Image: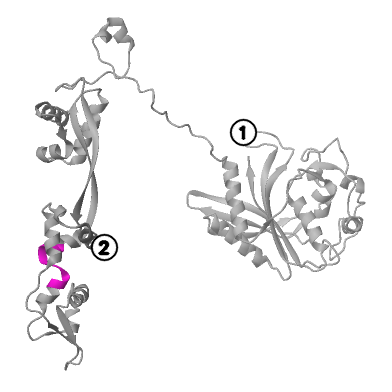
Amino acid sequence: MADTGVLETLLGRIEKADGGVDSLEAADSLGLDHQVLVGAVKSLQALGDLISAELRSSKHWELLGEGTEIAEQGSHEARVFGSIPPEGLAQSELMKLSFGKIGFSKAMSNKWIRVDKAHEGGPRIFRTVELIEDQVRAKLLLVQRGNSSELEEKEKNELKKRKLLSEVTVKSYWITKGSSFSTTITKPETELTPEMIANGSWKEKKFKPYNFEALGVAPDCGHMHPLMKVRTQFRQIFLEMGFTEMPTNNFIESSFWNFDSLFQPQQHPARDQHDTFFLSDPALAHDFPPDYLERVKKVHSEGGYGSQGYKYDWKVEEAQKNILRTHTTAVSARMLYKLAQQEKFTPVKYFSIDRVFRNETLDATHLAEFHQIEGVVADYGLTLGDLMGILHEFFTKLGITRLRFKPAYNPYTEPSMEVFSYHEGVPTMIKYGINNIRELVGHKVNLQMVYDSPVCRLDS
């Protein structure tokens, strides 16, 4: 609410006025900023029917900064004319003046001056008339004195184009007495308290009326879930880096694509029921590429492609078991096999962000599922440096630039490494496990190096 003194002064002026008070005139006579007086009007309106205020708007012309300068010192063309002595002035000297360039062109169009380009010593400017009338300044002075009505609209618009004038819309209030007018201010009560009811004081008090048309505060809604927000951010980064998203809508996967095609041995602890969810219906999968199934079996049991294998009796019954996928790398294995069936190999960059499932103990920060972020790059001649470059760019787009790479050992990936990052806002080292595998998925294409990179795991 505005200052009580200002409110009472305004009320006193309204009481003495005959018919009403204009807010602009009242602000000027009281020595107040008009916006301060407008605030007082709104405060009085909030107190009930003390006053009635009618909003009015009017337009008038005002001088801009350059217009004010011209009204005081003369137009640019007049100042140029006044700067030229009878013997003339070198054009180069005139152009050094602050008003020279604009004033020269205007004075030339008014035919007040001429240029002698053949003059010895360079072009020289001479007057062509003895006296001039600075009409631009005269018009601006009329506006400055509040007599803009004496100018034609065409003249005003010409000055406006020169950015010397601007048309200003002024809003003001015509203030009159209200049905409950009073020169004293009594602030109405905004709520009925138990004490007022108990002592009966509510009978003498005036209460502020409820505004049943007022809109309440809009409830916060429609926000993106934090996990989805992070997922969207990561997805955008991969797309900006030229990756294509893999289809990851199959939560149920066979052990063959989830484990065996990634050369994880069948006796590995991760394939135990304590770590993996196995399905009872349907319990088994049967649709596998026969030739690829045989090559995977051979590498597991006998070795090949430079590997000595695990030297055990690989069983197709284990590979047929259906599970809830433990990682999205199963999708990568399918995509790489599909890529190998092409007649002509084309380099690819794939990524996926989706849910995976582990049979883990539930606690306050862990569920039996989480999101895995994964990237796969397939091409000839790739090196570990290429992967490090991709990872560095990925984290840079996240705002994390201080990275360290460290060699690591993983029993079924080669080479392997870990990435450590330091974030200024979180002064701890964050570790990311990076598994880089060499995958031989078909005899038609020799993929020299394929990197499978689950760069981060988000626990939900």
Q: Residue at x 23, y 21 (%)?
A: 187
> Considering only vertical position in the picture, is 324 above or below 423?
above
The amino acid on which the numbered mark 2 sits, given as a three-letter code, is: Lys
How is the structure coloured here? one colour
State the image quarter where residue 206 is shown.
Answer: top left
Q: Residue at x 19, y 62 (%)?
A: 66
Residue 74 is one of the magenta-drawn residues: yes
Residue 176 locus on image (x, y percent): 18, 28
Instruction: Write down the region rendered in magenta.
Output: 69-78
Residue 98 is one of the magenta-drawn residues: no
Whether residue 3 is visible: no
The amino acid on which the numbered mark 1 sits, given as a three-letter code, is: Ala
> Considering only vertical position in the picture, is 55 above or below 47?
below
Instruction: Please identify, in this view, whether the residue under mark 1 or under mark 2 is nearer the observer.
Output: 2
Q: Is residue 40 left or right of residue 229?
A: left
Q: Is residue 9 left or right of residue 208?
A: left
Q: Are marks 1 and 2 in contact (CB under 8 Å)?
A: no
The front one of 257 and 14 is 14
> Considering only vertical position in the picture, is 442 above or below 60?
below
Q: Quadrant of the N terminus?
A: top left
- Which residue has dot 2 on it? 161
Residue 304 locus on image (x, y percent): 87, 63
- Dominant SS of magenta comes to helix
Residue 364, numbered circle: 1
Tell me the SS state at disc 1.
Answer: loop
Tell me the SS state at disc 2.
Answer: helix
Q: Quadrant of the C terminus?
A: top right
Q: Residue at x 66, y 45 (%)?
A: 371
Q: Residues within 10 Å of mark 2 (few under 14, many from 20)?
A: few
Whether residue 198 is visible: yes
